[in-house]
Image: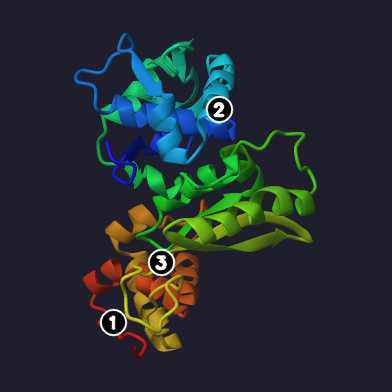
Amino acid sequence: MNRETRLVVKDNALIDASFNLSLVEQRLMLLAIVEAREVNKLTPDSPIEVKATSYMEQYKIDERNAYKQLYDASKHLFNRQFSYTDRYADTDAVTVSRWVNEVTYVKDKGMVVMYLNRNVINMISRLEEQFTKYHLSQVSELTSQYSIRLYEILIKFLNIGNSNKYPLNELRNLLGVGVDEYSQMSGFKKRVLDLAVDEINKKTDIQIKYEQFKEGRVISHILFKIGKKKDKKSKVGKDMNTIDMFADMTIKQALMFGDKLSRDTAFQNHYKANVGESIEDYSERIATMLMDGFYVKEWIQYLENVGFVPTRLSE
């Protein structure tokens, strides 16, 4: 399989799961997920082989480091867990699961052999409507474990243009930041958030930024804006890292289409109202965002469905 065509596909429950895997462990699991999806009738008894040669090619690692990293990851992977929102007896529940039932390092063959947990198998092979996919090559050059996680979390929002408004503690859990790690906001931003945003913007196919929201004087929530970078084959003379933008809406337009979107079921399913938020406040929040051309572009499919005719910025 070509390095550029390896596709990672996960159920959104796994994307939204809380876990703490190191950079190498994430890289190993991502390759395992790609390999597992090629297995016919995948079960917990199916051996998934990740070879050092494949690891070297995908992540541009030299042979010595590849062998060492696979060996180190294999020692710890069995004990790694993730938790996700589930249903049991028609009520919400939280399930804690292992990634693998068994893992073996085969030194002479330079490979790790693992047997995936049934929950992981269900989340990568028996997909319904809510799943996320991306090319593994997009995260292969990321060198922070937080960058890979943030990319995965945000890529599913690409067609909408912005993420959920994450409570800070929830975002920390999703990124795998421990309770005692970077407890000060300055450290969290420097070592986790800003580092991941900067690396994603430099090395992947998307461009992101974030907004901070406060309760009193304390930062309580983070919302991300996400856009696709322009294709490198686009017109000469344009910055290839900029996001294709549409013209901003006028206040009158924004209020009208904010109201329409707030009542549109398809849009509601993608950009949900906050818990307890009235339809008026939801509509007003959408309208405020529509005065930024970034959101006009990212929500264009929903806007066109409610009668909007787009106007691009002049080329």
Q: Amino acid at mark 1?
A: Pro
Q: Nearer the viewer, residue 160 or 189?
A: 189
Tell me the quarter of the picture where residue 259 sits: bottom left
Circle 3 SS class: loop
Relative to 72, is 191 on the left or the right?
A: right
Foreground disc of the pair 1, 3: 3
- Which image quadrant is residue 304 in? bottom left
Look at 61% across and 56% down and name the residue there: 222
Residue 229 is tagged as: 3
Sequence-wise, the earlier of marks 1 and 2 is: 2
Pointer 2 local density, CA inside 10 Å: few below 14, some 14–19, many at least 20: few
- Residue at mark 1 to residue at mark 3: CA–CA distance: 20 Å
Secondary structure beneath dot 1 equals loop
Do the numbered discs 3 and 2 sit on residues whose CB atoms are within 8 Å? no
Q: Which residue is mark 1?
A: 310
Residue 290 visible in image:
no
Disc 3 residue type? Lys
Quarter of the image where the N terminus is located: top left
Q: Quadrant of the C terminus?
A: bottom left
Task: Calculate the distance from the C-alpha at mark 1 to the C-alpha at mark 2.
Answer: 54 Å
How far across and how far down the image is residue 308, in percent?
27, 79
Depth check, front residue: 62 or 127: 62
Q: Kindly identify the residue that appears in the image at 41 percent across and 37 percent down.
A: 57
Q: Quadrant of residue 9?
A: top left
> Which mark identifies residue 64?
2
As rendered, which of 23 and 313 lies closer to the eye?
23
Q: Nearer the viewer, residue 115 or 276?
A: 115
